[in-house]
Each structure stands twice: as C-alpha cells, then as structure tokens.
Amino acid sequence: MKKRFKNKKLSQAYIQGAAYRYLERYATTEANLFFILRRKVERILADQEDVEEVRQNAETWINETVQKCVKMGLVDDRLYAESKFNSFMLSGNSLAQIKNKLRTKGVPQDIIAELIEAAKNDQPDLNFKSAIKYARKRRFGPFRIREEQENTRNKEIAAMARAGFSYDETNRVLSGDRNELEDILYG
C-alpha cells in the first residue's frame, strides 16, 4: 500500500530533515539531491490545493538546503565521482559506460573529464583491462564454460559493444589466451 502525504505540512524544516535522512543513507551529488528533494515535494503537493505559492517557497527551501549541505561538506561531487569511478572500474565497466553513469547522476562534465584523463595517464590500457574483467564476469571468450555454439561469438561481441568496448578490444579479449589475459589483469 502506498503512503499518502495528505496531512504533511511542507516547510523548510521538513525539507532539511528529508535531505539529512537521505544523506545518512546514500552518497549523492548536488544535482541528484535537488532532484530527490523536488520529487519529494511534488509527491506531497499532488494531494494538496493551492500549490503554486507553496511550490515557489519549496524551491527556495530546496536551494538553501542543498547549498547548506554542500557548505557543510555533506555533498561533494568530486568525492562522489572518484568513489563511483573506482567502483565502476573494479566491476569492469568501460570508460564510456562510466562517463554515462556519472553524467546521469549529475556529476559535472569537467570532473568526469579530469577523472578519465587522470586514469588514462596512470594506466594507458585501462579500458582493455576493463574489457577483460567484463569478459571474465560474463564468461565470454576464453573464460567460457559451455561449448561455443554457432552464433555465440557474435552475441559476445554485441554484448561487449553495448557495454562500450571497441571492436579491437573485444576481439583481443575474445580471441586471447586465458592465462595471458589473467597475467595482464593481475600481473
């Protein structure tokens, strides 16, 4: 059963409390916190009348609350982006996919570009290593357990292309030797 917000009083204290409760549970970006709080306000206002004036006040309260959270250090776009970037890299996401995921969470473009550039400078073959991790996780190519069927390779190539890996990287991984790929990954 869905909660109804009929008797909720929308105030600045309510919005601040909602922001703090959200931040206790999740790390987020400034843009995403705006989105979360606006969505909460809209759910409350859906059941009320005379909403325009309250909506304008709520927008002001949301802006003040988010700025206060940024000033207090509860919301830090760079720190969030760095932690998510590292997490995505460890799980075998391509640089293109990581860029899209960070963009959808509201991380500014300049921070994303800096992170990707720094990662490429540290490890030039970073995307290839991610392709190996992805293939290992999905059991593609040399990591395959089952027998190869007629169109298995084409399906694997398509899946890796959708994941954001280039044809050259995909081909190198799928036609590589398992021991050599693991040496590249862990050696």
Image (spheres, grey):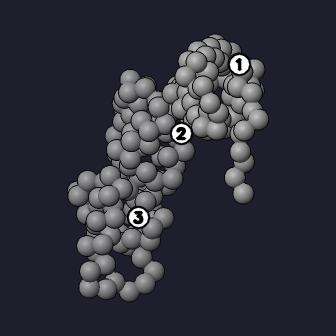
- Judged left or right of residue 135, residue 73 is right
- Between residue 37 and residue 46, name the one nearer to us: 46
Bin the neighbour count of mark 2 within 10 Å (Cα to Cα): few under 14, some 14-19, many 20 and up.
some
Please report the residue visible at 29 percent of the width from the left and 58 percent of the height from the top. 161
| Residue 59 in picture, x, y percent from top left | 57, 20
Residue 178 numbered tag: none
Amino acid type, mark 1: Gln
- Between residue 68 and residue 15, name the one nearer to us: 15
Q: Which residue is mark 3?
A: 135
Residue 12 numbered tag: 1
Determine the CA span between mark 2 and mark 3: 21 Å
Viewer can see residue 24:
no
| Between discs 3 and 1, the one toward the N terminus | 1
Q: For the residue labelled by badge 3, is the local secondary structure a helix, a strand or a loop?
A: helix
Q: For the residue labelled by badge 2, is the local secondary structure a helix, a strand or a loop?
A: helix
Q: Nearer the viewer, mark 1 or mark 2?
A: 1
Above or below residue 176? Residue 81 is above
Amino acid type, mark 2: Lys
Amino acid type, mark 3: Ala
Please report the residue visible at 64 percent of the width from the left and 38 percent of the height from the top. 47
Please report the residue visible at 69 percent of the width from the left and 52 percent of the height from the top. 2
